[in-house]
Amino acid sequence: MKPMQTLPEGYILKGSLDLSRNTRALLGLNLVGVVLFFLFAWLFTALAVQIRPDASAVFSVVEISGIWSFVRLILVIVLLQVVMIVLHEGFHGFFFWAFTRTHPRYAFKGLYAYASMPGWYFPRRQYLIVCLAPLVGITLLGFLLITVIPAVWILPVLVIMTLNAAGAVGDMAVAIWLIRAPAGCLANDQGDAFNLYVSA
C-alpha cells in the first residue's frame, strides 16, 4: 500500500491528537520532553566518552564568568535549537517528499514546529518511517560526526542530538499509537493535528 490523497471507502476515524486544541496534551508532552532531555544528555554523553575518550575534557562544566558570557551561552543554545529544528523538520519533510514526490508544508506555532502533508493518507509503515526519521537519523549522524570532528565541536553536536531526541517526544507518542493500531490503518498528518483511520 502506498500513500494516497483519497481516503479509501470503508475507512473511519479511529482517533485524533490535536495539539492546537489540547493544551493539556501539549503541556504533558513538554514535561516528558524535559525528563527525556536529561536522560538523553546522560546517555549520549556516556556513549560519546566511549567513542572519543581523548575528548573527555569538553564535557566539563561550562564556566560562566560574567553577564556577557551568560548571554553568549544563551545565544549559542538558541542557535543550536534553531539548527536542531531545521534538521528535525527537514528529516520529516524529506521522507514525506520521498514517499509522495510532493513538497510538504512547514510551519511554526508557539512551542513547536512541524512538517505536514494535510492532503495525504499514509500506511502505517511509511508513516512510522516519516515519524521516527529525525530521532534515528540525527542520532546516527551525530555519533558518526563525533568519530571524526575536532573535539571542540563534540559538545555542540551532543546538544543538538539531545535537544532533538527530547523534542521527538511527540513523534514517539504517535509511533507508539501507530504500532498498537491495526496493520491496515492510515495516518493523516495535519501538522498540529494527527488523525488515525482504520477500516470499518
Image: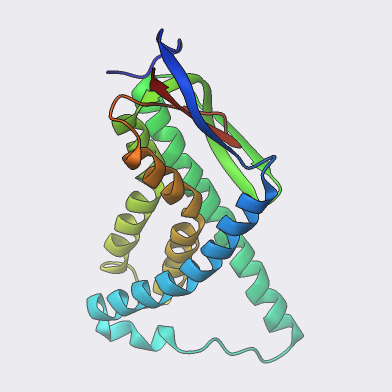
Q: Residue at x 53, y 63 (%)?
A: 32
Horizontal relation, residue 22 to residue 169: left or right: right
Give the image location of residue 64, x and y in percent. 64, 88
The image quarter containing residue 6 is top left
The image quarter containing residue 17 is top right
Quadrant in which the C terminus appears: top left
Give the image location of residue 44, x and y in percent. 35, 72
**Is residue 195 visible to the viewer in this orientation of the structure?**
no
Horizontal relation, residue 73 to residue 122: left or right: right
Classify 17 as above or below 33.
above
Horizontal relation, residue 113 to residue 89: left or right: right
Classify 176 as above or below 197.
below
Color style of the picture: rainbow
**Is residue 110 visible to the viewer in this orientation of the structure?**
yes
Tell which of 189 and 94 is nearer to you: 189
Quadrant in which the N terminus appears: top left
